[in-house]
Image (spheres, rainbow, N blue to C red):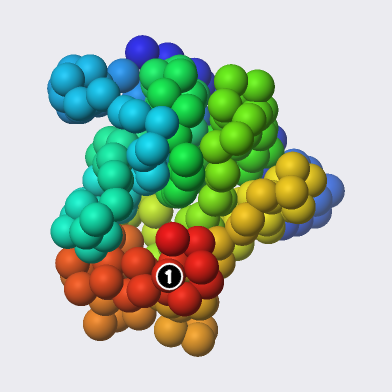
Amino acid sequence: MKLKFVKAAVFSAALFAGGSAMAQEVKIDSSYNNVYYKGRMELFENLPLTGKSTVFLGNSITERGMWHELLPGKIVMNRGIGGDNTFGVLARIAPIISAKPVKVFLLIGINDIGRNLPVEVIASNYEKIIQQFRKGSPKTVIYLQSVLPMNDDILKADYLKNKGHLIVQLNDRVKALAAKYKLTYVNLHEVFDDGTGKLKASLTDDGIHIKPAAYVLWVDYLKRKAYL
């Protein structure tokens, strides 16, 4: 398990006559290898991938997708782990790369944001993921999916409150990486954004995860765009 704590300088407004800056300690948690992660990894070891697979890779939002039922007739493997972050994905992609899947749909980053990992660090991990796939399985088609919007009005996870702007920043970086490596950037905000930057209230119960019916919209969008 990796756990990092760093100090970040947070500059306040001029609270005093001299306008002095106040440094606060911000905890950054990059851990991933918990009991649930280990259990999912044990499951994956017994569900080998093939070169004909389409892989959905990510966190709980990916894990909750019933991809087999949504994509009948296709060899689809769910490699989502609830609570996972970019460090966790980096630690577990070797078997996926070795299988040389046809396509990989990556969606990761919201848990990094929730744990106060800087956008620069998350984007750097994204790039490492891309580079490892390019090196080990160059024919795999990689789709970088945007991190979904949240809805602060009904968000139950306090650690994610008021962090929607970081999702925007991260998605900008992911989109830039897609352009740099000539990959497809999948803008899922076209499906889930209510027009004000929030996750549609009708598609979520907790402001971050999506309802089962939302996955139908997701897959329909991927099909319309000819990604599937």
Give coordinates of residue 67: x percent, y percent. 25, 54
Location of residue 145 with respect to 63 vertically, above or below: below
Inspect the image, locate mark 1, and give the three-letter code of the amino acid beneath it: Lys
* Picture coordinates of residue 79, whole percent (x, y): 31, 37
Residue 153 in view of the camera: no
Q: Residue at x 52, y 71 (%)?
A: 225
Position of residue 83 in the picture relative to residue 112 (left or right):
left
Q: Nearer the viewer, residue 127 or 154?
A: 127
Residue 161 shows in the view:
yes
For label 1, the crowd category at 10 Å Cα-Cα, with few meaning under 14, some 14 to 19 and many 20 or more, is few
Identify the image quadrant of the N terminus: top left
Question: Which residue sits at x=31%, y=28%?
Answer: 49
Outermost bottom residue: 195
Vertical position of residue 86 compared to residue 5: above or below? below
The residue under the point 41% across, 31% down is: 51
The image position of residue 164, as x and y in percent, is 51, 63
**How many marks are shown on the rendered structure?**
1
Is 179 placed left or right of 162 in the picture? right
Image point 31% across, 19% down: which residue? 33
Task: State the residue in front, 83 or 20.
Answer: 83
Could you say where residue 88 lies in the image, as x and y percent from the top left?
Answer: 41, 26
Q: Nearer the viewer, residue 107 or 54?
A: 54
Q: Secondary structure at mark 1?
A: helix
46 with respect to 81 (left or right): left
Residue ranking furthest to the top: 1
Q: Quadrant of the C terminus?
A: bottom left
| Quadrant of the rendered image containing residue 137 | top right
The residue carrying mark 1 is 223
